[in-house]
Image (spheres, rainbow, N blue to C red):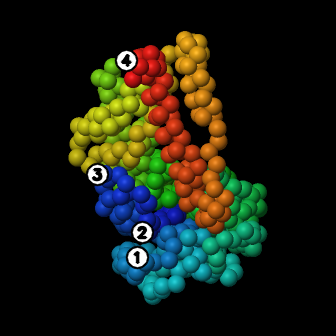
Amino acid sequence: MIRFIHAADPHLDSPLQGLEAHEGAPVEVLRGATRRAFENLVSLAIEESVDFVVIAGDLYDGDWKDYSTGLFFRAQMVRLQNRGTPVYLIAGNHDAASVITKKLSLPENVHVFSTRTTESLEVAGHPITIQGRGFPNRAVPENLAIEYPMAVPGRFNLGLLHTSLTGRPGHDTYAPCSVAQLREKGYQYWALGHIHQPEVINEDPWIVFAGNCQGRHIKETGARGCRLVTVSDSLQVEGVEWRSLDVVRWAELNIDLSGIETETEATRLVSDAMGKAVTAAEGRLVAARIILSGTTQLHGSLHRNDEHWNAQFLASAQDHGADAIWIERIKVSTSPVYDLAELAERDALTKIVVSNLNETDHKPILLPPEIEEMLSILPLEIRTQVEDELNGEQRATVLSDVRAIILDALATNGGQN
């Protein structure tokens, strides 16, 4: 029996943007999360006595600011070298040969695949052949899979590839290929990287995205980790077990306030959702975005008294224990109970106000051409996040808040305040 770990996209020392804007954010925990998750990966390999480890690209997040990132990785590899565990890795778009300028010698147990051509490496002492190739540049639009050789007869063949396959939302299309093209190579297992969402694409043969080791922002919710793969003596995959590695668990808490009339009821629902997230995280810090929806009489208050509500929800988070949950953001997407059409018919002035608010609410928010040009040169995963902030999310939230406050005043006070 042979066992190995398939990991991908550790993004060691990935910078976390905008934390300074969040008062009370657990900055040190979040900034150190990628390293701690990687330490968990190495500890798992040691505890399970695996025969080898493969890392399918994006070990780093880009060029090192200093040598501490490389020294950290090297120290972890020495832990595995002391146990006789080899490691096989390829470069992805974030740590392509053209991206990383600083270098350190690596322990003898670490094998880095060529970025110029597909390379075949045999795992010493085992009937395993690993085929792989790293990225020479940040952008690789060509199909690398077609260059991979056919399976070696009588051996377990593992393909190590950084790819978007046929494309995934939020990820640039790099080294595109199809499942059919991977299947025709005759390998028993394809260890894929680049897509951060864990996903089993196919089971015959196994084609698997391990996902990243640690979620880095709210668009990477849920468990993050690696796959522990067991291969039988007949060189067939017996098991592909999920193992969590993350130390911070990102979560969206969607709370429906439909029919809720009091602050006590709303706070209880939010606290209950927090409790479930904390339990599911199994001791990890939960970084949560609270999204409030539904038709409720609290709609106006949630917008008008946002400082009070934010403090109340933060207080509820404290009740779940120190370092249990951190609220990244509170997003109010509720609807008012009152009928806008009926409100608009109350008098001529109110009708004009409601009509103008509705027009503003539906107008697209356009970015200046110079900003659009600057965004176009950013990597897709960064560009998407920035566009969410610039191209509507923050400004649309402000417009929504203003609209809710005005309408609430019209409905409850006849527009006198």
- Rounded to the nearest whole Å, what is the CA distance between mark 3 and mark 1? 26 Å
Q: Amino acid at mark 2?
A: Asp
Query: Is residue 186 in view from this perspective?
Result: no
Q: Amino acid at mark 4?
A: Glu
Q: Could you say whether the residue bearing mark 4 is in a helix, strand or loop? A: loop
Query: Considering only order in the chain, which callout, 1 or 4, is on the residue closer to the N terminus?
Result: 1
Query: Considering only order in the chain, which callout, 3 or 4, is on the residue closer to the N terminus?
Result: 3
Q: Does residue 19 appear left or right of residue 174 in this picture?
A: left
Residue matched to label 2: 13
Comparing labels 4 and 1, the label whose residue is closer to the camera:
4
Looking at the rendered structure, the number of numbered marks drawn on it comes to 4
Comparing labels 4 and 2, the label whose residue is closer to the camera:
4
Choose between 268 and 357: the one closer to the eye. 357
Comparing labels 3 and 1, the label whose residue is closer to the camera:
3
Seen at 52% across and 44% down, the residue is 395
Q: Could you say whether the residue bearing mark 1 is in a helix, strand or loop? A: helix
Question: Looking at the image, do the residues carrying marks 2 and 1 touch, with CB atoms under 8 Å apart?
Answer: yes
Q: Which mark is residue 269?
A: none
Query: Considering only order in the chain, which callout, 2 or 4, is on the residue closer to the N terminus?
Result: 2
Pointer 3: residues within 10 angstroms few (<14), some, or many (20+)?
few
- Rounded to the nearest whole Å, what is the CA distance between mark 2 and mark 1? 7 Å
Question: Looking at the image, do the residues carrying marks 4 and 2 touch, with CB atoms under 8 Å apart?
Answer: no
Residue matched to label 1: 69
Q: Amino acid at mark 1?
A: Thr
Query: Considering only order in the chain, which callout, 1 or 2, is on the residue closer to the N terminus?
Result: 2
Residue 241, image x, y percentages: 49, 52
Residue matched to label 4: 261
Q: Does residue 187 appear left or right of residue 93 in this picture?
A: right
Choose between 25 and 226: the one closer to the eye. 25
Question: Looking at the image, do the residues carrying marks 3 and 1 touch, with CB atoms under 8 Å apart?
Answer: no
Q: Amino acid at mark 3?
A: Gly
Question: Looking at the image, do the residues carrying marks 3 and 2 touch, with CB atoms under 8 Å apart?
Answer: no
